[in-house]
Image (cartoon, coloured by chain):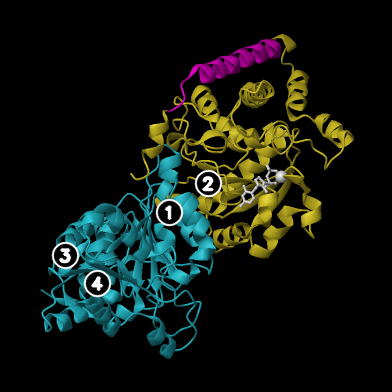
């Protein structure tokens, strides 16, 4: 199996799906000639030409809105919003148009629209380039929100997103662009949206970790194994719809649950998991569900703040030990 | 699409009758929710849509019935939709501000002012990619021209030479606010130049003038010559919605505009052409009866069951 970076996995997914279906096209700021602000569409302009790979003006509302209209008119657009922090400029098109058109019009229009966007949490770029907004979009019915944490997941999920007839927000993590993984060399390799992945099996504690936190949870699990604590690490991969079946099956088995994410506790991802686990698994729990999240503050410029604000492997180890006490 | 003069008149009459009969329902408390009346603007929708094919797209707004009907939406399912009935074209889920018919290129209305503009640009982009000469039309009010999407859409349409026709129905008011108070330049069309978009100001109460301007814009779009902004100067006879006491304007102003009624004006034109008044009279009676039948159909139709709210969140 070839080894690919997270970034090339994304490029490969788009290249394969664009070759497979000529209705698929890509537009966004700097996606064509420059190959993407973060290099995640390199080579696509050469492969598919300027009609299907388009640089747009810096007009987020029309980037998404044209995606909506083109989808209603039979295309399968992939649009890119450079940073997830920019979603405020196109939230109406996402929440009211893309997410609701199939519903409002009684299923007469499908909405095969992929909105690719990047999360730059923990990159030190400052308060407008640092946010984990998966919970914000996860609150909107009609949207699927996908957030892969490995190259293989990124490729399989992006291909599924492009083939999906519903709008999908696909959140890429710039901090993960260079990590590598072996990926099946198969043009129909897909990972289903809405299905969590047990990244490591264990029996004492379930750690639900998303995005950047998955690798840290795995590192923590490895360390804790040395102390005889068996940690099960679950990566939801899809934020909405969230695979509570996999999570609750794990928690019913382990009786303890920690949720680690880059999303704030306040109305956040961890809160959602904790509440649902509370409802589904209350009598199986030995301890209250714990959450690790950054505090309820913006992130200033500079890496030192990132390290201070965000859960790291040590924090996960400590929280798990606490749950086992 | 060539349309004979009688068809054009009939199209306006259907809209006029629908609006009149819906207002009666509202007065009798039989209408659920807001009515954004299209009375007075009939020539806009009909003049524009009379030059379009079924394969052309339109994107409507909150004041959309005229657009839907002029583009050919069937009367009964349209009317039932307005009342939120299960027999409506969207099963009653869309209601007064949302109806669509993909087969006719009607890509919906909107509850969000300005949101249809990018969607229309997207449809125009799809049409351009298809290369079959289809065009997209966006209908919006002058109030919506103060939304950011307006500039973004004009800009990209010009940059990409999209087959897009932006139709601004300037009825002088956005809700309760006179347009003049909200702009430094009262002609919406004047803004097109800055974006490199062709534009025209048209008498929106003259269906033939609208039709001619639309024809020019459509021809340019089909020929790959890019977008046009048409500003149709018109007036909404009613309030922003039915029941609006209209304190922001005078009854005299309303009377002046009613004297410029687009339907009566075109009727006079037909009479001058030699169409017999009898023929027009029976057409008017037939349209009134047809609309009444659609209203009855809508009133008699069932509401969608509450549990249906859970359906079709996803495809
Ligand atoms: C984004 C947004 N802002 C405000 C409103 C409330 N609203 C509905 S219609 C309207 C006025 C629109 O005026 P115009 O565009 O001129 O259209 P008209 O109603 O005159 O046809 C307003 C402010 C809304 N629905 N959406
Ligand atoms: Mg207005």
Q: What chain does mark 2 sit on? A: B
x%, y% of residue B307?
A: 38, 33
Chain coloured cyan here = A
* Lateral position of residue B119 relative to residue B280, left or right: left
Task: Say which element carries label 4.
Answer: helix
Query: Do the numbered discs 1 and 4 sit on residues whose CB atoms are within 8 Å?
Result: no
Which residue is disc 3 drawn over? Answer: A254
Which residue is disc 1 drawn over? Answer: A140
Residue numbers of the magenta segment: B279-304
Q: Earlier in the sequence, mark 3 or mark 1?
A: 1
Could you tell me how many numbered marks the image carries?
4
Q: Which of the two marks, 2 or 3, is nearer to us in this view?
A: 3
Examine the rendering and report whether any part of residue A162 can be seen.
no
Which residue is disc 4 drawn over? Answer: A9
- Mark 2, other Cα within 10 Å: few <14 / some 14–19 / many ≥20: many
Task: Say which element carries label 2.
Answer: strand
The correct choice, above or below, for B151 with respect to A166 in the image is: below
Q: Which one is in front, B102 or B253? A: B253
Q: Which one is in front, A47 or B273? A: A47
Q: What chain does mark 4 sit on? A: A
Quarter holding the N terminus of chain B is: top right
């Amino acid at each position: 199996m070839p080894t690919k970076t997270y970034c090339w996995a994304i490029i490969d997914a788009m290249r394969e799906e664009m070759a497979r279906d000529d209705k698929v096209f890509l537009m966004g700021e700097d996606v064509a000639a420059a190959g993407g602000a973060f290099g995640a569409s390199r080579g696509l302009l050469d492969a598919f030409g300027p009609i299907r790979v388009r640089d747009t003006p810096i007009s987020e509302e029309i980037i998404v809105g044209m995606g909506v209209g083109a989808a209603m008119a039979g295309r399968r657009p992939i649009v890119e919003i450079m940073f997830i922090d920019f979603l405020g400029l196109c939230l109406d098109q996402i929440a009211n148009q893309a997410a609701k058109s199939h519903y409002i019009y009684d299923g007469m229009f499908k909405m095969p629209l992929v909105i690719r966007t990047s999360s730059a949490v923990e990159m030190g770029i400052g308060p407008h380039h640092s946010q984990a907004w998966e919970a914000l979009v996860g609150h909107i019915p009609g949207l699927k929100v996908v957030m892969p944490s490995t190259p293989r997941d990124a490729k399989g999920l992006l291909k599924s997103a492009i083939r999906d007839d519903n709008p999908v927000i696909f959140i890429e993590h710039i901090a993960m662009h260079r990590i590598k993984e072996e990926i099946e060399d198969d043009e129909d390799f897909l990972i289903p949206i809405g299905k969590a992945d047990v990244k490591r099996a264990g029996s004492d504690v379930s750690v639900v970790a998303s995005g950047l936190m998955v690798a840290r949870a795995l590192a923590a699990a490895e360390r804790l194994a040395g102390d005889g604590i068996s940690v099960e690490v679950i990566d939801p991969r899809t934020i909405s719809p969230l695979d509570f079946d996999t999570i609750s099956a794990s928690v019913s088995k382990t009786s303890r649950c920690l949720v680690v994410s880059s999303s704030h506790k306040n109305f956040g991802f961890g809160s959602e998991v904790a509440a649902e686990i509370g409802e589904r698994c209350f009598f199986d729990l030995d301890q209250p569900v714990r959450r690790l999240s950054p505090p309820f503050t913006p992130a200033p410029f500079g890496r030192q703040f990132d390290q201070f604000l965000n859960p790291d492997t040590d924090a996960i180890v400590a929280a798990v030990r606490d749950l086992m006490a | 699409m060539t349309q004979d003069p009688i068809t054009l008149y009939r199209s306006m009459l259907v809209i006029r009758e629908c609006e009149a009969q819906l207002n009666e329902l509202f007065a009798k408390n039989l209408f659920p929710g807001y009515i954004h009346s299209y009375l007075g603007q009939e020539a806009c929708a009909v003049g524009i849509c009379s030059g379009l094919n079924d394969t052309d797209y339109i994107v409507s707004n909150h004041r959309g019935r005229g657009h839907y009907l002029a583009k050919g939406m069937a009367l009964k399912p349209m009317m039932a939709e307005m009342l939120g009935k299960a027999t409506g074209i969207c099963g009653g889920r869309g209601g007064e501000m949302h109806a669509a018919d993909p087969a006719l290129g009607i890509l919906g209305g909107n509850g969000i002012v300005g949101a249809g503009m990018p969607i229309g640009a997207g449809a125009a982009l799809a049409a351009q990619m298809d290369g079959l000469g289809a065009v997209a039309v966006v209908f919006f009010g002058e109030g919506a021209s103060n939304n950011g999407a307006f500039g973004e859409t004009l800009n990209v349409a010009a940059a990409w030479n999209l087959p897009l026709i932006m139709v601004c129905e300037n009825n002088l008011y956005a809700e309760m606010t006179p347009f003049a108070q909200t702009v430094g330049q009262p002609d919406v069309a004047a803004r097109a130049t800055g974006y490199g978009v062709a534009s025209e100001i048209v008498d929106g109460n003259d269906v033939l003038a609208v039709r001619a301007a639309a024809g020019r814009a459509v021809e340019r779009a089909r020929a790959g010559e890019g977008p046009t902004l048409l500003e149709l100067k018109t007036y909404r006879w009613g309030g922003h919605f039915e029941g609006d006491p209209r304190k922001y304007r005078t009854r005299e102003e309303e009377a002046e505009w009613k004297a410029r009624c687009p339907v009566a004006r075109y009727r006079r034109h037909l009479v001058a052409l030699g169409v017999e008044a009898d023929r027009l009279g029976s057409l008017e009676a037939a349209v009134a009866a047809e609309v009444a039948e659609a209203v009855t159909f809508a009133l008699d139709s069932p509401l969608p069951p509450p549990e249906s709210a859970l359906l079709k969140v996803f495809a």
